[in-house]
């Protein structure tokens, strides 16, 4: 499994997921289709699949153009509002990308139809990967635009949090063995893992007393709600 990070817009990323065995590829949230086509040519892969995490324009806004540039693509998503959707999925829906297994995880909150994509390979030492859209960020989580603290708690703690701790939240890496993972730590851009997030992401640590004390709560869900409110109201101090 290889994941190529493609910068998009001013602060987003697209992910080119490549099955090394078959050279079949999927693109996650291709908001800038021309960059995707260039990457497909550069890496000599066959793009067959679009994985859309949610319907917001900065994630799904390139789907229609992607279909025009590369007709026949399968466009997965969990919401009828996803542009160009050809295959609507629900929780635990699974399918193959070459030798890779992709499992859909329904994580509503940021939007009511948000899907994360969990990728594994059978009989492999490669760690799994999960593409989390605007549900889970490194050291953060998405805004509760269409959902509640209860839903984000379920998404982060009960769904994503129960994946193997070595699961990678991808960056530009070849995910192979634990020794290779160690080498990533010396690079300027490093992937995170779920184990990392349980260490330093406050939204993943809402059961911990120190985090609860920070927001003066004793309940994990109320802690989640208070953390999100604090983050939403935070403003960078002017110099």
Image: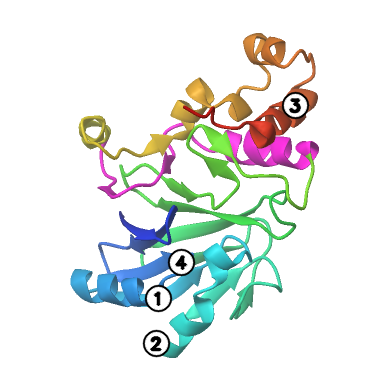
| In this view, the mark in front (4 or 3) | 3
Residue drawn at x 49%, y 29% as measured from the top left: 197
| Residue at the (60%, 28%) spot, across then down | 204
The Cα atoms of the two marked residues, 1 and 3, are separated by: 38 Å
Measured Cα–Cα span from mark 4 to mark 3: 39 Å
Q: Name the quarter where the N terminus is drawn.
A: bottom left
How far is the residue under mark 1 from the one under mark 4? 23 Å
Q: Is residue 49 magenta?
A: no
Label pair 2/1, CB-CB below 8 angstroms: yes
- Separation (CA) of disc 2 from disc 4: 23 Å
Q: Tell me the magenta residue range.
A: 149-177
Residue at label 3? Answer: 226
Q: How far apart in space, not on screen, are marks 2 and 3 (Cα)? A: 44 Å
Decide which of tag 1 and tag 4 comes sooner along the chain: 1
Looking at the rendered structure, the secondary structure element under dot 4 is: strand
Question: Residue 212 is drawn in which quadrant?
Answer: top right
Nearest to N terminus: mark 2 or mark 1: 1
Circle 2 SS class? helix
Task: Assess disc 3: are there few (<14), some (14-19) or many (≥20) residues with their C-alpha within 10 Å of its C-alpha.
Answer: some
Q: Is residue 97 above or below residue 136?
A: below
In the picture of the structure, the residue carrying the numbered disc 2 is 69
Res. 96 mark: 4
Per the image, label 3 sits on a secondary structure element best described as helix
On residue 33, which mark appears?
1
Residue 98 in the image, given as x and y percentages of width and height: 36, 68
**Upstream in sequence: badge 1 or badge 3:** 1
Measured from the top left, where is residue 99 in percent x and y? 36, 63
Instruction: State the CA–CA distance, disc 2 to disc 1.
Output: 8 Å
């Amino acid at each position: 499994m290889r994941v190529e990070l493609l910068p998009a817009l001013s602060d987003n990323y697209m992910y080119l997921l490549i099955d090394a065995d078959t050279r079949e590829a999927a693109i996650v949230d291709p908001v800038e289709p021309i960059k995707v086509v260039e990457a497909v040519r550069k890496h000599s892969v066959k793009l067959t699949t679009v994985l859309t995490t949610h319907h917001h324009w900065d994630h799904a806004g390139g789907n229609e153009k992607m279909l025009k540039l590369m007709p026949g693509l399968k466009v997965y998503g969990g919401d009828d509002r996803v542009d160009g959707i050809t295959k609507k999925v629900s929780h635990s829906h699974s399918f193959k990308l070459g030798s890779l297994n992709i499992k859909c995880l329904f994580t509503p909150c940021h939007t009511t139809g948000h899907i994360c994509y969990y990728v594994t390979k059978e009989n492999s030492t490669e760690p799994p990967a999960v593409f989390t859209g605007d549900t889970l960020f490194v050291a953060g989580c998405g805004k509760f635009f269409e959902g509640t603290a209860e839903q984000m708690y379920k998404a982060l703690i009960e769904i994503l949090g129960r994946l193997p701790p070595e699961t990678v939240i991808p960056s530009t890496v070849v995910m192979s063995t634990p020794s290779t993972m160690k080498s990533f730590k010396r690079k300027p851009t490093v992937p995170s893992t779920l184990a990392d997030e349980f260490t330093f992401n406050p939204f993943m640590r809402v059961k911990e007393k120190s985090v609860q004390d920070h927001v003066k709560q004793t309940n994990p869900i109320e802690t989640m709600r208070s953390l999100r409110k604090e983050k939403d109201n935070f403003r960078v101090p002017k110099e």
